[in-house]
């Protein structure tokens, strides 16, 4: 697998974790909708890419899943943050801020020269 | 990013998910289904029609199938899963062609099995470390005088090394081989052991099965460490054996330790089973070991030595120290140690004297075995090419469905690996059986040897590696061609490999290589088989039928030489009266025992000019020559010589030629190691040590006369002539021996013809091994040749049909096919015969009476192979020419 996909999946994973922290247990469709809404329709999300990311997060132990019933009485698989997931979210948020800060500074100097 | 721990957790989950694939798949489809339903409901609420809502939901998801695939890939380990899929598919494919699979697996099993068997010999004798603690730092020390290597130490020299060399943490000495008999309960038994310095087991760092080694103050005490075999056999593996008494050569010894099963002394093949402190030497090795005064002299070399390197010291440091010691000794004792040098080897390594010969022999065998494997590989490659070619259509379909070349390559390599690994498993079973057979060979030497060959982990690793390599080797070419199949031709079922107009195809090259290798192999085999035949029809000069032998060693039971003579005389009287006995004689060592005594001899009054001829020495009793049917040329037999009467000797014709030329030797005197003998008789030549030797000069001494001054350390062989059943007589002779002395151990009981069979050990071993390999090679080559030719004919059925339809006579078609096949074979002969000539040159030293450029072999083998090839070409050609043109044209 190439580098590019990994990065993409990385940001997607962060979005998933953040969504689950904000809204509590949620099914895949709900997460997708929420990400789309929060991004203000700037992000065109292919819902299908969400599921491999969810699976990876679950395998790594950051989220857990359970079958449950949705608001309108549909059977659905609900995901929630684990404790490791909370820690991971904090860490990744911090990392993300650092990365963007560095990149921002870098781009600024580039412009000047 | 996630931590390594989380990654590991994910990896473990993925591996375990392989086994719950179905459940995961079902759960995923449920989840996606619920996702779509939720989305559709939302869309409906937003006012879409049902069909638009559904389409939008599916579109937004990016396709159910694609999502499923994407998730599945991370469900479990993708490559492992697809490997398992390849495996299942491969097995399914192979099950369709049981004959091909059987031929391929058998070819591999034979090829790899041959290699594993030879490698198990290498592993047992070259690679296996001594069963001691830290085998790497345990060394065996030898001395060399000038260019000749490897003698034992003298007592004082051993002490010099022990006391001065700082690189060693310990140096132990031992007297290498002492025969003894175990008495007490049960049949008396002959065993061999060693007399060791008390630190021997400490230096060896041997982990005892029971008890301990010797303590420093036990040098002169009657204590003994017994081998594991004695412990099992005579004590039934009793755990309380320590402290018990063992009757060894009539003396009680207290058992202090039991060695582990793998330990039989530190010599590679010498099989010793007990150890006693060196201080007991005058009791246990009376008459054979040097006298106390000699043991302290610098000119007597009798003590073997091992040394343990100090931690942190290297062999080079030890060698440097020993060199200084050698220089000092040479200066201090110029009369004995002028050219002294030391040699260091790993303990338990190949005997230094025979190292080169053994290595050469094993190399030759390995090369031959690899040749067999190459032939097997070429064979299977050919079969597999046909198999792969027949699957061109399948490959074409898979390529057109988007399978990558790598994917096809992998699929075919998986199949070839299945075959080669199955062959490998079968090969291990085969070589398990073969090594058992090898271990049962026993050379006809009077000392105990452990020649057990067994499979160990090294052999298993070797066989496994060979299987993998063989699988890759034979699988790669077919895999490559198949995966590069041109889609359009492949779909039409045309074969890439059989393209018309090409002569140097991969397949033809393989046939040539295979036949050429078979020529080499079969020529080598032919030579060895002829050598075996020569060896077994060699005139050894004495009669082997109608004589049985058994040995006793009364000396180890405390007999004086006078009492031994008395005992032998009594036994002769008693056996003469036995039914079926035709006469009794004695000798110190039976002929063809691969070794024995020898000395330089010269004529008295005529000092030798140049080198002194080395003469084999035997002690025999009167009647020996008559019993073995050795004709007397002149003079008389021994009669009633005593130690007091003048020394007399009987010599063979070779001896006469060497020392007397054309002079009459009767009544002349010869001098051997300071003893003067008068020659009283001349007998015909006999083979002395081995069947294959050049005839050696031999001098027979009177047993009754020599036994006092020069007793045999190997005991005495009783030869009894028989008419009728040897086994019944053998039992009677045993009874007579035990009625004279029930404590005597009897050993080496067999008929002379059995002894001769053992004497043919080496030519027989080589003959059997090479014979087997040669037969394998022939079989494989014949199968391969036939398979390839008949396949290529069957691929050309259509072309042949056209020939026939256009009116070509059937016999011309036959000739065409045969000619093409035989051209390949002729090319192979052209390459193979000179290669075989070169290859067999190195095997000269193992051949008896056969030149490496043996004409019959080099004519017979190519002719024979040509005949096989002709049959292999003719049968398919005949089939082809009988094809109905109409059927042929519609073929495919």
Image (cartoon, rainbow, N blue to C red):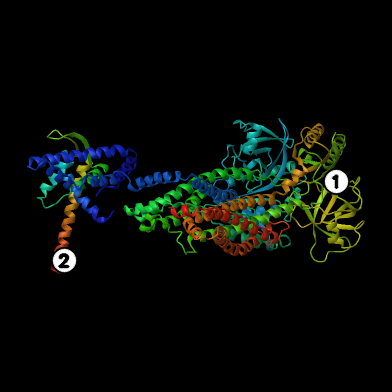
Instruction: Give percent across and percent down for residue B853.
Output: 68, 62
In the rendered image, residues at marks 2 and 1 fall on the same chain: no
Q: Which type of secondary structure does the marked residue at label 2 adopt?
A: helix
Spatial CA span between label 2 and label 1: 110 Å
Instruction: Give percent across and percent down for residue B489.
Output: 38, 58
Instruction: Give percent across and percent down for residue B521.
Output: 61, 56
Toward the viewer: B785 or B379? B785
- Give the chain letter at badge 2: A
Q: Looking at the image, which residue sits at the far bottom?
A: A113
- Give the chain letter at badge 1: B
Instruction: Give percent across and percent down for residue B651.
Output: 86, 54
Q: Which type of secondary structure does the marked residue at label 1 adopt?
A: helix
Toward the viewer: B712 or A72? A72
Q: Is residue B334 among the parts visible in the rendering?
A: yes
Pointer 1: what residue? B624
Res. B111 mark: none
Q: Is residue B513 left or right of residue B360?
A: left
Q: Residue at x 63, y 36 (%)?
A: B256
Pointer 2: what residue? A110
Q: Is residue B41 left or right of residue B398?
A: left
| CB-based contact (under 8 Å), mark 2 and mark 1 | no
Toward the viewer: B288 or B718? B718
Q: Residue at x 87, y 51 (%)?
A: B631
Q: Residue at x 18, y 52 (%)?
A: A96
Mark 1 crowdedness (10 Å alpha carbons): few <14, some 14-19, many ≥20: many
């Amino acid at each position: 697998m190439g580098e590019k996909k990994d990065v993409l999946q990385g940001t997607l994973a962060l979005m998933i974790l953040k969504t689950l922290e904000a809204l509590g247990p949620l099914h895949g469709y709900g997460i997708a909708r929420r990400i789309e809404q929060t991004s203000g329709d700037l992000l065109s999300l292919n819902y299908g890419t969400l599921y491999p990311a969810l699976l990876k997060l679950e395998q790594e132990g950051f989220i857990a899943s359970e079958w449950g019933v949705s608001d309108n009485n549909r059977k659905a698989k609900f995901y929630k943050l684990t404790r490791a997931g909370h820690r991971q979210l904090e860490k990744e948020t911090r990392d993300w801020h650092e990365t963007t800060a560095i990149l921002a500074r870098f781009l600024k100097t580039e412009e000047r020269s | 990013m996630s931590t390594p721990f989380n990654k590991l957790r994910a990896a473990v989950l993925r591996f375990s998910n392989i086994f719950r694939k179905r459940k995961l798949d079902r759960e995923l489809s449920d989840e996606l289904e619920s996702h779509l339903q939720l989305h559709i409901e939302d869309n409906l609420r937003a006012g879409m029609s049902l069909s638009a809502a559904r389409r939008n939901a599916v579109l937004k998801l990016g396709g159910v199938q694609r999502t499923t695939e994407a998730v599945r890939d991370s469900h479990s380990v993708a490559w492992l899963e697809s490997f398992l899929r390849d495996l299942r598919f491969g097995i399914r494919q192979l099950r369709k062609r049981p004959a091909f699979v059987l031929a391929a697996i058998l070819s591999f099993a034979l090829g790899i099995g041959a290699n594993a068997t030879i490698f198990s010999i290498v592993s047992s004798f070259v690679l296996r470390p001594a069963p001691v603690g830290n085998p790497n730092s345990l060394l065996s020390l030898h001395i060399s005088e000038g260019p000749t290597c490897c003698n034992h130490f003298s007592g004082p020299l051993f002490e010099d090394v022990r006391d001065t060399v700082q690189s060693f943490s310990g140096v132990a000495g031992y007297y290498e081989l002492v025969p003894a008999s175990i008495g007490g309960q049960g049949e008396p038994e002959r065993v061999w052991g060693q007399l060791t310095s008390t630190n021997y087991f400490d230096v060896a760092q041997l982990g005892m099965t029971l008890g301990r080694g010797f303590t420093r103050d036990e040098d002169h005490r009657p204590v003994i460490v017994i081998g594991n075999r004695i412990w099992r056999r005579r004590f039934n593996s009793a755990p309380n054996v320590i402290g018990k008494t063992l009757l060894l050569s009539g003396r009680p010894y207290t058992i202090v330790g039991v060695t582990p099963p793998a330990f039989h002394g530190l010599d590679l093949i010498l099989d010793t089973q007990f150890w006693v402190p060196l201080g007991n030497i005058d009791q246990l090795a009376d008459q054979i070991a040097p006298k106390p005064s000699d043991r302290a002299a610098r000119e007597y070399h009798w003590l073997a030595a091992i040394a343990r390197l100090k931690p942190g010291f290297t062999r080079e440091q030890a060698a440097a120290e020993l060199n200084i010691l050698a220089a000092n000794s040479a200066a201090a004792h110029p009369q004995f140690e002028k050219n002294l040098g030391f040699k260091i080897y790993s303990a338990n390594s190949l005997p230094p004297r025979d190292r080169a010969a053994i290595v050469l022999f094993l190399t030759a065998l390995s090369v031959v075995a690899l040749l067999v494997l190459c032939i097997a590989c070429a064979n299977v490659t050919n079969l597999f090419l046909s198999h792969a070619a027949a699957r061109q259509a399948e490959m074409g379909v898979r390529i057109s469905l988007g399978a990558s070349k790598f994917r096809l390559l992998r699929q075919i390599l998986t199949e070839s690996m299945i075959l080669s690994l199955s062959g490998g498993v079968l090969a291990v079973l085969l070589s398990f059986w073969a090594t058992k057979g090898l271990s049962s060979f026993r050379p006809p030497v009077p000392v105990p040897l452990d020649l057990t060959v067994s499979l160990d982990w090294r052999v298993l690793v070797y066989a496994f590696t060979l299987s993998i390599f063989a699988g890759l080797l034979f699988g790669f070419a077919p895999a490559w061609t198949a995966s590069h199949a041109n889609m359009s031709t492949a779909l039409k079922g045309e074969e890439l490999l059989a393209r018309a107009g090409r002569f140097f195809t991969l397949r033809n090259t393989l046939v040539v290589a295979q036949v050429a290798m078979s020529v080499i192999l079969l020529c080598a085999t032919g030579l060895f088989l002829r050598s075996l035949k020569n060896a077994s029809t060699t005139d050894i000069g004495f009669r082997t039928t109608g004589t049985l032998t058994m040995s006793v060693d009364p000396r180890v039971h405390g007999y004086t030489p006078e009492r031994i003579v008395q005992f032998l005389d009594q036994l002769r009287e008693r056996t003469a009266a036995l039914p079926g006995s035709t006469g009794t004689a004695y000798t110190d060592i039976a002929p063809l025992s691969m070794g024995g005594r020898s000395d330089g001899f010269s004529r008295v009054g005529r000092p030798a000019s140049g080198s002194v001829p080395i003469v084999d020495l035997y002690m025999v009793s009167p009647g020996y020559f008559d019993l073995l049917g050795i004709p007397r040329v002149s003079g008389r037999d021994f009669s009633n010589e005593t130690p007091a009467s003048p020394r007399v000797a009987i010599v063979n014709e070779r001896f006469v030629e060497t020392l007397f030329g054309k002079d009459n030797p009767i009544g002349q005197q010869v001098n051997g190691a300071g003893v003067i003998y008068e020659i009283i008789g001349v007998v015909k030549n006999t083979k002395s040590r081995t069947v294959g030797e050049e005839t050696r000069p031999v001098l027979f001494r009177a047993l009754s006369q020599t036994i006092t001054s020069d007793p045999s350390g190997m005991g005495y062989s009783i030869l009894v002539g028989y008419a009728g059943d040897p086994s019944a007589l053998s039992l009677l002779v045993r009874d007579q021996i035990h009625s004279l002395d029930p404590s005597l151990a009897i050993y080496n009981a067999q008929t002379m013809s059995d002894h001769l069979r053992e004497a043919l050990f080496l030519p027989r071993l080589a003959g059997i091994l090479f014979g087997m390999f040669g037969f394998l090679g022939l079989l494989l080559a014949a199968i391969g040749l036939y398979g390839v030719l008949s396949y290529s004919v069957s691929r050309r059925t259509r072309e042949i049909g056209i020939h026939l339809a256009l009116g070509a006579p059937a016999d011309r078609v036959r000739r065409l096919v045969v000619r093409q096949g035989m051209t390949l074979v002729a090319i192979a002969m052209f390459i193979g015969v000179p290669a075989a000539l070169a290859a067999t040159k190195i095997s000269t030293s193992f051949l008896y009476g056969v030149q490496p450029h043996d004409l019959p072999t080099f004519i017979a083998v190519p002719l024979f192979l040509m005949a096989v090839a002709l049959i292999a070409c003719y049968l398919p050609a005949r089939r082809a020419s009988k094809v109905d043109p109409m059927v042929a044209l519609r073929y495919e």
